Image (cartoon, rainbow, N blue to C red):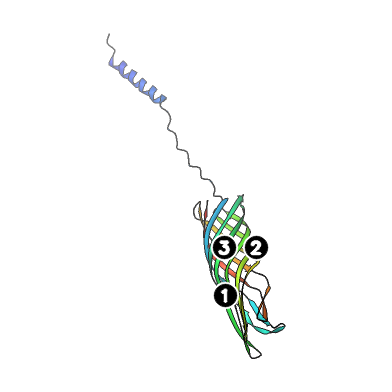
């Protein structure tokens, strides 16, 4: 029996339509999930900076005060390493940081008291700090305040007439500062910060003369850190 051509065409059309109905609908690709940046984690990095504004008035005693020869205004370059840990909850970031700096923060002052030359020199060779930090994060931008322990090595020289001596002391003091930091990538960030360091007041003496030292300075530092 011969099947009419019209019936065959109708059958093929119905089969194609049925197959089209069975074809899976196209799936739209899912949008990638972008996680918010977090400051939480350990980090380490390096910094360089400049110190200025130290004011240490030099009075010579023998053993009572003879007179003042001037003020040491220490300044100079510094550079070193920092490492720490941050923890972020909501927009608040808390952490702790330690740093160690090599430095040449120094000055010399000269004066005449009662016709006798006096000279003093101060040179901060290195210093370090251990500080908690607290800040507020706007995504990858962080503004922070910090303060804590400071310690450092200070070389001192003092002379008055034929009496002269030098000393090298490691002193403990305090520091406070603030800064801003920006995360360029999930791991790499850059910062600029201000720091004030004060090593307290103490007496240096030798060769029958002495002076009260009170070394301090302000510093601006720039640095980079890598978050692990």
Q: Which mark is drawn over residue 100? A: 3
SS under mark 3: strand
As displayed, is residue 115 above or below residue 122?
A: below
Q: Residues within 10 Å of mark 3 (few under 14, many from 20)?
A: many
Q: Give x and y (percent) for residue 115.
A: 64, 91
- Of residues 214 and 159, the one nearer the viewer is 159
Mark 3 or mark 2: name the one nearer the start of the chain.
3
Q: Tell me where residue 81 sits by quadrant.
A: bottom right
Q: Give the Cα separation between the discs numbered 1 and 3.
A: 18 Å
Q: Are marks 2 and 1 in contact (CB under 8 Å)?
A: no
As displayed, is residue 152 above or below residue 184?
A: below
Name the residue beneath numbered marker 1.
106
Quadrant containing the N terminus in the rendered view: top left
Outermost residue on the bottom side: it is 115
Q: Residues within 10 Å of mark 1 (few under 14, many from 20)?
A: many
Q: Give the Cα separation between the discs numbered 3 and 2.
A: 12 Å
Q: Give the Cα separation between the discs numbered 2 and 1.
A: 21 Å
Mark 2 or mark 1: name the one nearer the start of the chain.
1
Q: Give x and y (percent) for residue 202.
A: 68, 73
Q: Give x and y (percent) for residue 136.
A: 61, 55
Q: Which mark is drawn over residue 149? A: 2
Outermost residue on the right side: it is 64
Q: Tell me where residue 58 sits by quadrant.
A: bottom right
- Of residues 163 and 23, the one nearer the viewer is 163
Lateral position of residue 14 relative to residue 70, left or right: left
- Of residues 224 and 203, the one nearer the viewer is 203
SS under mark 1: strand
Q: Residues within 10 Å of mark 2 (few under 14, many from 20)?
A: some
Lateral position of residue 131 relative to residue 182, left or right: right
Q: Are marks 3 and 2 in contact (CB under 8 Å)?
A: no
């Amino acid at each position: 029996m011969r099947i009419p051509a019209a019936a065959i065409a109708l059958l093929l059309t119905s089969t194609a339509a049925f197959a089209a109905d069975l074809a899976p609908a196209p799936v739209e690709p899912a949008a990638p999930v972008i996680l918010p940046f977090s400051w939480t984690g350990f980090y380490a990095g390096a910094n360089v900076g400049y110190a200025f504004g130290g004011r240490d008035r030099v009075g010579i005693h023998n053993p009572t005060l003879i007179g003042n020869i001037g003020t040491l205004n220490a300044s100079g370059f510094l550079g070193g390493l920092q490492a720490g840990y941050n923890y972020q909850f909501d927009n608040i970031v808390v952490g702790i940081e330690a740093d160690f700096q090599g430095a040449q923060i120094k000055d010399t002052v000269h004066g005449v008291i009662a016709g006798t030359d006096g000279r003093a020199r101060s040179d901060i060779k290195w210093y370090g700090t251990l500080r908690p930090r607290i800040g507020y994060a706007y995504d990858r931008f962080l503004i922070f305040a910090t303060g804590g322990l400071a310690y450092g090595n200070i070389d001192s020289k003092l002379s008055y007439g034929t009496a002269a001596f030098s000393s090298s002391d490691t002193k403990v003091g305090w520091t406070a500062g603030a800064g801003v930091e920006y995360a360029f990538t999930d791991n790499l960030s850059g910062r600029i910060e201000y720091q004030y360091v004060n090593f307290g007041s103490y007496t240096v003496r030798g060769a029958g003369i002495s002076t009260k030292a009170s070394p301090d300075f302000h510093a601006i530092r720039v640095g980079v850190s890598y978050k692990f």
